[in-house]
Amino acid sequence: MNANGMDPLSSWYIDEKLNYFAFVFLASLILRVISCLLKSIHTEGFSKNVWKEFFIQLKGDRHIKIEELKEGDEFKKKVHILNGDYWFPMILGLIELSCFPILMFTRNWTLIGAWLAFKVLPHWKAWSDERSTFNRFLILQGLQLIYIALVLVPYVKLI
């Protein structure tokens, strides 16, 4: 039992499971698209290459980016090998979107907070230097939590 007197393992069930998991998958896909769009805007700005970069990010695999730099009268090419995320963030999002509504319903806020801290801590140093990545994380996490509270938690019911 947690502090609210609910047993988080046996006092709830998911109503309309098919709809619930369809909404989980849909939200994960939408968050993936938003993430890729924000990454591509960060990388390319609002240039004509933003959509090309978006589809590269959406694809999620390793890719090579060639940047042409002008130094004086000469052009030089700089090659960047970028590792893709291979859709791992979406898989993690599916797990979070499946579990967080149950944790919210059973008022296990400590577990949600601990998980978010667990996600933030390894990146803290890099994010202190690169704020746009951290801001993207906060935007996506905020959208995910709002969606969970408004759409998914109502599917969790007491037994």
Image (cartoon, grey):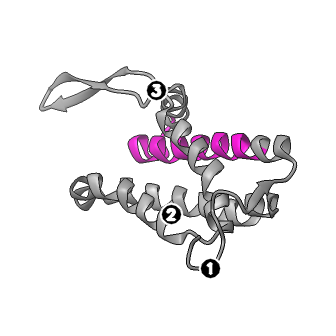
Choose the circle earlier in sequence order: 2 or 3.
Answer: 3
Residue located at (58% from left, 44% from top): 95
Q: Which residue is mark 3?
A: 86
- Tell me the amino acid under the disc marked 2: Ile
Neighbour tally class for label 2: few under 14, some 14-19, many 20 plus, Cα within 10 Å:
some
Q: Residue 10's x, y, as percent?
A: 70, 58
Amino acid identity at mark 3: Tyr
Query: Which picture quadrant has residue 43?
Result: top left
Query: In the rendered view, does 3 fall on the left or right side of 16?
Result: left
For residue 122, side relative to residue 13 (left or right): left
Pick the front one: 90 or 66: 90
The reply to whether callout 2 and callout 3 are in contact (CB within 8 Å) is: no
Q: Residue furthest left?
A: 72
State the CA–CA distance, disc 2 to disc 3: 25 Å
Q: How far across and how far down the image is residue 99, in percent?
A: 61, 52
Q: For the residues carrying marks 1 and 2, which lies nearer the camera in this image?
A: 1
Is residue 52 depicted above or below 33 in this figure? above
Which residue appears at 49% of the width and 46% of the height? 46
Tell me where residue 106 appears, x and y as whole percent.
Answer: 65, 68
In whole angstroms, how far apart are the C-alphas of marks 1 and 2? 16 Å
Check disc 1 and report the residue beneath it.
Answer: 4
Image location of residue 88, percent across then percent down? 47, 33
Residue 69, placed above or below residue 64: below
Q: Is residue 50 magenta?
A: no
Residue type marked 1: Asn
The 10 Å Cα crowd at callout 3, few under 14, some 14 to 19, many 20 or more, is some
Residue topped by disc 2: 112
Q: Quadrant of the C terminus?
A: bottom right
Discs 1/3, front: 1
